[in-house]
Image (spheres, helix red, strand yellow):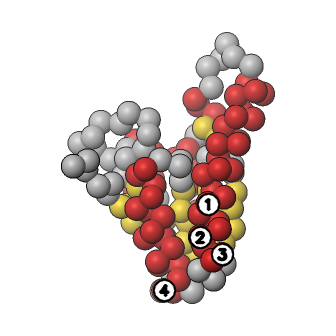
Amino acid sequence: MYERILLPTDGSDAADRAIEQALNLAETYDARLYVISIVDQTAIPPDVRADILYEELQEEGERAVDDIEQKARDAGIDVRTSIPRGTPYRAILDFADDHDVDLIVMGTHGRRGIDRYLLGSVTEKVVRLSERPVLTVRMDEPS
């Protein structure tokens, strides 16, 4: 059913449950798992040294995908990682198209202070604009 699964991550707690789902699905279907973290070019103010901030965002993205990559490898899952730059929702959709993924798995809340009653803006845009199935994984509410 699924041969290529895409897991975009920002390293937030919301991503943890999506990670579990993506790993489980990839293992169940013997699918390749693509794990990406987007360097959000829209988050960089025009009056800062972009090169320093890009480097920090790149390192943050690498940390976000490294742990998932190791978990996938430990489970025997074929995993590929990437840290593209761009507008997050657009970069996710482009990556999905470029790699002909069968399913996108995403958490519903990010760490960017999104209204708790709505899907995170990136997830919401991916759900609305994707031509591929998107599995959204709700973050547990705090107790």
Residue bearing the label numbered 1? 67
- Amino acid type assigned to the residue bearing label 3 in the image: Arg
Disc sitting over residue 138 in the figure: none
Residue found 62% across the figure and 26% down from its top: 44
How far is disc 4 from disc 2 in space, using C-alphas? Answer: 15 Å
Q: Secondary structure at mark 4?
A: helix
The dot on residue 28 is 4
Residue 64 vs 137, above or below: the answer is above
Q: Earlier in the sequence, mark 4 or mark 2?
A: 4
Determine the CA span between mark 4 and mark 1.
20 Å
Task: Identify the image quadrant of residue 67.
Answer: bottom right
What amino acid type is highlighted by mark number 4? Thr
Look at the image and tell me whether residue 94 can be seen: no
At x 37%, y 47%, the residue is 109
Which residue does the numbered mark 2 point to in the structure image? 71
Contact check, label 1 and label 3, Cβ < 8 Å: no
Give percent across and percent down for residue 62.
Answer: 68, 50
Q: CA distance from mark 3 to mark 2?
A: 6 Å
Vertical relation: 46 (above or below) 17: above
Residue identified by numbered label 3 = 73
Instruction: Return the residue found at the far right.
Output: 51
